[in-house]
């Protein structure tokens, strides 16, 4: 066999790396490695990470992942083709060099594009083709070599991804049926592919399972990457968790206020909206602000717990959809949690309505929160994500889930009540009446302390609205 080699070199002073094709050889050009990637255009790549990192930084991360993949393929003995979408051949050559095999991906969904890649490579001299994406930081040359080796006695090789898909697929013969009827982007891509392969009688080999880097929560595991994958990429310091259910009247104002009140520090803030099945424009409003939105069955504790699991920030702030935090809330939270004896905190409360009665309620609520160290959930509870995880998060209670968490937190340390206030909507006070609302709140707390089931308390509370 003849020995050929790519001769390309790319230097990025921002990343401090140099990529070179001198290590790429094609001792066996009948083995093709196809890399599926995109040109790193801000706003068009790593879109799930844009709410956390911003369009420019998300695109930069995509660039790093593709370069990392190629760098790890140095010294391999198979031919590499880069199939790309977005950009142009000229733009790709300026990025990766002119001596790589660059091909524009065909139109259609992911399944159609992969099908075409296998048909064209296996139909033009390749005896084996392995196709991989650039979203898996853990993939390396050994993994790809294992894939080619598995094709000695298997028809199909797959690299399972933790999200239910696969990061690599290899075949010796085109198999169009393998890409039909698969719900691309879903959690059953791998399972559906395996079912099809079984029906076709294909011998399948599974490689080790790897994690991709596609969603905000995936960032956490790569913080300490030895190759510095996230070096210089600022991750959020604070994640604001907002549970919603039919909040179209309030949510937009709250999200806008979070940005304004955050000021220059808002770049370090991540907002996570978790909807419990709204039938109005709540989800649409959240997405229009570029906010991450997750959905689950209704239940404030369940929703906030999901939001905390998806969040990236080291600190969590749980905020009601009709509440507005004080100005410069991030440094206020950081200063409070920096005290060695403080395990969590909350803001003071101010109901957004004029009148002596409301100021009286504010005063009583804030006195009680400071004296008993037991703030209400509408005061904006904040704590470190590590503490929240150690406590097991919110319990799935129909009511008083925030009070239950506060009780468990008090056993860990002091809960700080800041003088700066959250501005809360008066709507529930107006709807039920000031005195009745206050008495109902006290009844719920008394029942909780007396050991009444949260289910019965919830039935009483919501049944008396």
Image (cartoon, helix red, strand yellow):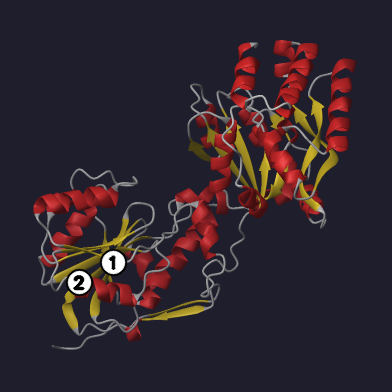
Residue 118: x and y in percent read 17, 61
- Residue 393's quadrant in the figure? top right
Residue 239: x and y in percent read 63, 47
Residue 366: x and y in percent read 85, 31
Mark 2 / mark 1, whichever is N-terminal:
2
Q: Nearer the viewer, residue 68 or 223?
A: 223
Q: Which residue is mark 2?
A: 150
Residue 353's label in the rendered image is: none
- Residue 157 lies, with reference to residue 162, above or below; the image says below
- Secondary-structure class at tag 2: helix
Q: Residue at x 60, y 67 (%)?
A: 232
- Residue 352 lies, with reference to residue 317, above or below; the image says above
Q: Residue at x 54, y 30 (%)?
A: 285
Q: Which residue is mark 1?
A: 207
- Would residue 259 be visible to someone looking at this image? yes
In the picture, which quadrant includes the C terminus? Answer: top right
Residue 425: x and y in percent read 73, 23
Q: Residue at x 15, y 54 (%)?
A: 197
């Amino acid at each position: 066999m003849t020995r050929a080699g790519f001769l390309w070199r790319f230097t990025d002073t921002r990343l401090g790396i140099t990529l070179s094709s001198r290590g790429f050889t094609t001792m066996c050009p009948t083995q093709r490695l196809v890399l599926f990637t995109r040109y790193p255009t801000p706003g068009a790549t790593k879109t799930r990470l844009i709410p956390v990192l911003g369009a420019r930084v998300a695109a930069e991360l995509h660039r790093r992942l593709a370069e990392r993949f190629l760098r790890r393929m140095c010294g391999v003995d198979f031919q590499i083709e880069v199939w790309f979408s977005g950009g142009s051949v000229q733009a790709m050559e300026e990025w990766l060099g002119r001596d790589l095999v660059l091909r524009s991906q065909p139109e259609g969904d992911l399944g159609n594009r992969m099908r075409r890649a296998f048909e064209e490579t296996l139909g033009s001299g390749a005896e084996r083709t392995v196709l991989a994406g650039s979203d898996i930081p853990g993939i390396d040359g050994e993994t790809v070599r294992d894939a080619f080796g598995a094709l000695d006695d298997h028809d199909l090789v797959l690299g399972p991804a933790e999200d239910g898909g696969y990061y690599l697929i290899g075949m010796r013969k085109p198999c169009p049926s393998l890409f039909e009827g698969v719900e691309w982007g879903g959690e059953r891509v791998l399972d559906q592919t395996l079912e099809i392969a079984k029906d076709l009688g294909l011998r399948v080999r599974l490689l080790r399972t790897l994690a991709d880097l596609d969603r905000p929560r995936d960032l956490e595991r790569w913080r300490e990457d030895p190759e510095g994958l996230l070096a210089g990429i600022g991750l959020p310091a604070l994640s604001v968790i907002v549970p919603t259910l039919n909040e179209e009247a309030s949510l937009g104002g709250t999200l806008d206020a979070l940005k304004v009140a955050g000021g220059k520090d808002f770049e370090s803030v991540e907002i996570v909206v978790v909807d419990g099945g709204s039938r109005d424009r709540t989800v649409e409003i959240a997405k229009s602000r570029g906010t991450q939105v997750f959905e689950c069955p209704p239940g404030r504790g369940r929703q906030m717990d999901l939001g905390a699991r998806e969040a990236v920030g080291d600190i969590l702030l749980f905020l009601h959809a009709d509440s507005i935090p004080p100005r410069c809330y991030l440094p206020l939270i950081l200063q409070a949690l920096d005290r060695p004896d403080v395990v969590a905190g909350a803001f003071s409360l101010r109901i957004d309505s004029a009148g002596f009665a409301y100021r009286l309620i504010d005063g009583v609520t804030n006195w009680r929160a400071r004296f008993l160290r037991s703030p209400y959930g509408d005061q904006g509870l904040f704590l470190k994500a590590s503490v929240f995880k150690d406590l097991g998060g919110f319990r799935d209670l129909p009511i008083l889930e925030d009070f239950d968490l506060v009780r468990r937190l008090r056993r860990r340390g002091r809960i700080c009540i800041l003088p700066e206030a959250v501005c809360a909507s008066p709507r529930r006070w107006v709807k039920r009446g000031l005195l009745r609302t206050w008495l109902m709140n006290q009844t719920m707390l008394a029942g909780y302390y007396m050991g009444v089931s949260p289910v019965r308390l919830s039935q009483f509370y919501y049944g008396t609205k």
